[in-house]
Amino acid sequence: MKEYVCALCPRNCGAVRQPESGSGYCRMGTLPRIARIAPHYWEEPCISGTKGSGTIFFAGCVLSCVFCQNYCISQEHIGKAMTADELTDAVKCLEQMGVHNINLVSPTPYIESVIECFSRYRPSVPVVYNTGGYEKAETLRRLEGIVDIYLPDLKYIRPELSKTYSHAENYAEYAIPAIHEMVRQTGKPVLDSKGMLLKGTIIRHLILPQNTRNSIEVLDTIQKEFGDSVLVSLMGQYLPMGRAAEFPAVNRRITRREYEKVLDRYEALGLEGFVQELSSADAQYVPDFSDDPWKGVQQSNENQ
């Protein structure tokens, strides 16, 4: 893809992007930079199943959360630039490995290549768009007919928190309309006879330490805005990673009391979905990223 001026995400930075470099917030070029291609077994049960979710991890996130567990790819940009043809090869490889779906993790800077890839080849399994939620609805509309499952975060309602921890004071202002667009495209969740998600939207929320009020406000907002049109994944896996040590309030794991306080609200609202146990807060679940994105496939093949 040739040079172009980018307006894909809510940053609206108008960056000039070359194939392998960019001057915008994400600092990414137009060619997808990919850090891992592999089956992934630690998503929600209806995503990972028994065969794994075919994940493609993209570098260069538009959010830059200070506590990101994937900090080395989101902000240090580990990975290798790949063409749309190579991206298509990755999709085909994962599909041949028998995964339940193709899971695009943080692909927002590369939507042009994503569209090009899936216009050339449509896999026989669902396509998942896995995002931090900081999206423009008009950009997402371009993915209609390509994405089967949306897996967005809804991290914050309060702008002071999204400004402090994700440098995005207007996070909720964009995330809520973006999720409405996702739901419009997918409709209510549809599962097959084995409980695997074929179509739909799952909203994730990660509980942060000392921020249970934010979590409760997020859950209340989900109930009010989306009702039973989505599934909700309440996540207790928080680990202080990335630059969390610079922010004392989030420089620890969540406590049992914090977890149960938010869980009580989740259950009282009657939300449907998944609840992650506190035991999931373990570094062993963080993927192994590399400048060789095919390393994950090699490891998976060796373990079979």
Image (spheres, grey):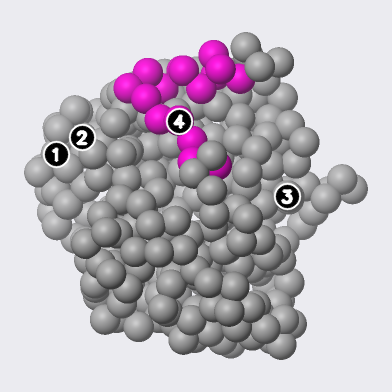
Q: Earlier in the sequence, mark 2 or mark 3?
A: 2
Q: Residue 22 got which mark?
A: 1
Instruction: Give the extent of the magenta segment.
Output: 285-300
Q: Residues within 10 Å of mark 2 (few under 14, many from 20)?
A: many
Check disc 3 and give the amino acid type. Answer: Pro
- For the residue pair 217 and 5, the one nearer the viewer reads as 217
Q: Residues within 10 Å of mark 3 (few under 14, many from 20)?
A: some
Q: Are the residues at dot 1 and dot 2 in contact (C-beta closer than 8 Å)?
A: yes
Q: Earlier in the sequence, mark 1 or mark 2?
A: 1
Q: Secondary structure at mark 1?
A: strand
Quadrant showing the N terminus: top left
Q: CA distance from mark 3 to mark 4?
A: 21 Å
Q: Earlier in the sequence, mark 3 or mark 4?
A: 3
Q: CA distance from mark 1 to mark 4?
A: 25 Å
Residue shown at the point (62%, 47%) measured from the top left: 43
Q: CA distance from mark 1 to mark 3?
A: 37 Å
Mark 2 lies on residue: 29
Q: Residues within 10 Å of mark 1 (few under 14, many from 20)?
A: some
Q: Is residue 30 visible to us here?
A: yes
Mark toward the viewer: 2 or 3: 3
Q: Residue 45 got which mark?
A: 3
Left or right, 253 with reference to 53: left
Q: Earlier in the sequence, mark 1 or mark 3?
A: 1
Up/down of 161 relative to 99, above or below: below
Residue 288 in the image: state x and y as whole percent.
45, 30
